[in-house]
Image (cartoon, rainbow, N blue to C red):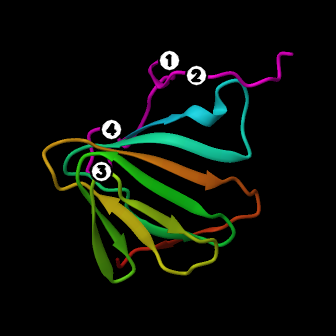
Amino acid sequence: MSDVKKPVLDSEVAKVGWYKGTDREIFGQALCDVGGASRIGFGLVELSPGCSTRPAHYHTQEEEHLYVLEGVGTLHLGAESYPLVKGSYVNFPAGQAVPHFVSNESQGALWYIMVGERIDSDEVVYVDDL
């Protein structure tokens, strides 16, 4: 039964880095893809101090969920900003045309879980002026 997914430890999953050395430095682990790709994305994300996930965006067909495990950050949702701390949760419904991004102005890493659908026909709409 090689197609059966088995438990995995996050410490056994390689971290991938994006935009290293910039103000968008992000590290992530796609825990869901160990043993084969999944229809739902489930990742552990580390946002470095002084960095953000810009540009702001929203999805036309995919729903996303964010849950903070450790650290302090800010959710920028449309024209509003909200503090993110351990235990914070937010849902970004599919087609909700309100752009979002996360920033970390603290001295430590912001760790969170990101869950999202993987729909091939989804369009990501980027907004530059948020």
Q: Nearer the viewer, mark 1 or mark 2?
A: 2
Q: Which quarter of the rendered picture does the N terminus lie within?
A: top right
Q: Secondary structure at mark 2?
A: loop
Mark 1, secondary structure of its residue: helix
Which residue occupies 28% across, 74% down? 81
Q: Give how far apart the Cα atoms at labels 1 and 4 are.
A: 21 Å
Q: Is 89 on the left-hand or right-hand side of 5? A: left
Segment tinted magenta in the rendering: 1-26
Labels 2 and 4: the sequence-earlier one:
2
What is the CA distance from the residue labelled 3 to the residue labelled 4? 25 Å
Q: Quadrant of residue 97?
A: bottom right
Q: Residue furthest right?
A: 1
- For badge 2, the amino acid type reads Val
- Of the numbered discs in the image, which one, if any, rests on residue 86? 3
Residue placed under numbered mark 2 in the picture: 8
The crowd level at tag 2 (other Cα within 10 Å; few <14, some 14-19, many 20+) is few
Do the CB atoms of the residues marked 1 and 4 lie less than 8 Å apart? no
Furthest toward the front, the residue is 87
Which numbered tag is attached to residue 12? 1
Give the residue displayed 44% in from the left and 20% down from the top.
11
Distance between mark 3 and mark 1 Cα atoms: 24 Å
N-terminal label among 3 and 4: 4
Report which residue position mark 4 lands on.
Answer: 20
Name the kind of residue labelled 4 in the image. Answer: Lys
Mark 1 or mark 4, whichever is nearer to me: 1
Q: Main secondary structure of the magenta part?
A: loop
Look at 63% across and 77% down and name the residue there. 95
Q: Evaluate if marks 1 and 2 touch, with contact meaning CB atoms under 8 Å apart.
A: yes
Residue found 51% across the figure and 66% down from its top: 91
Question: Which residue occupies the foreground of this view, 46 or 113?
Answer: 113
Amino acid on which the number 3 mark rests in the picture: Lys
Q: Nearer the viewer, mark 2 or mark 4?
A: 2
